[in-house]
Image (cartoon, helix red, strand yellow):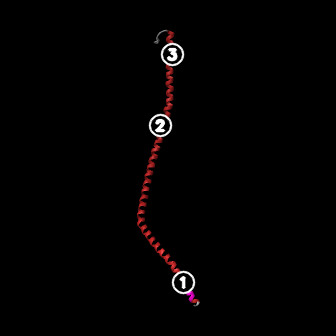
Amino acid sequence: MSIVEFAIGLVAVAFAVLVGCLVPVLIQMRKAVAESQQVFAKMNQDLPPLIVELRAMSQNVSELMEQTRGGVEHAAVLLHAMGEVGESVQQVHNVVRGSGGNLLTNVASVVAGVKAATRVMKDRMRKEGGSYNGG
């Protein structure tokens, strides 16, 4: 056997080993490619309805945001009006409290004046000994 024959035999054995190792790898790759095709086919079926649902959901969220924005604006107007009513009530309260104090002072002054006048009249009636009718 010559060196050339030995080299050819060695190359043939190496090729056979290489083919023997590559066959299971190629079989696995074929299975993976088939599964990938199934996954892509399933995605092509499921993805368009999902995209439609996402668009509808996005539209619903946009409408909800618009309604919420309108509700917040109405609430702001209501709260502003309530604040103005509160300020008016506070002003009325201050006026009533201030006027009430003046009113109470005036009433107390009138009552004190009536009491003083009554005492004076009683004292004069006692001193003069009779009724006092201005004459």
- Residue located 55% across and 84% down the image: 11
Which badge, 3 or 1, comes first in the chain's sequence?
1
Q: Position of residue 6 (x, y in %)?
A: 57, 88
- Which residue in the structure is indicated by mark 1? 13
Q: Which residues are magenta?
A: 5-13
User: Could you say whether the residue bearing mark 3 is in a helix, strand or loop?
Assistant: helix
- Which residue in the structure is indicated by mark 2? 89
Whether the magenta-drawn stretch holds residue 8 is answered as yes
User: Could you say whether the residue bearing mark 2 is in a helix, strand or loop?
Assistant: helix
Label disc, if present, on residue 119 of the rendered structure: 3
Q: Position of residue 43 (x, y in %)?
A: 43, 67
How packed is label 3: few (under 14 Cα within 10 Å), some, or many (20 or more)? Answer: few
8 versus 73 height, above or below: below
- Residue located 55% across and 86% down the image: 9
Residues at badges 2 and 3 in contact (C-beta under 8 Å)?
no
User: Which residue type carries mark 1?
Assistant: Val
3D distance between C-alphas at marks 1 and 2 = 105 Å
Q: Nearer the viewer, residue 78 or 102?
A: 78
Dominant secondary structure of the magenta stretch? helix
Q: Position of residue 58 (x, y in %)?
A: 44, 58
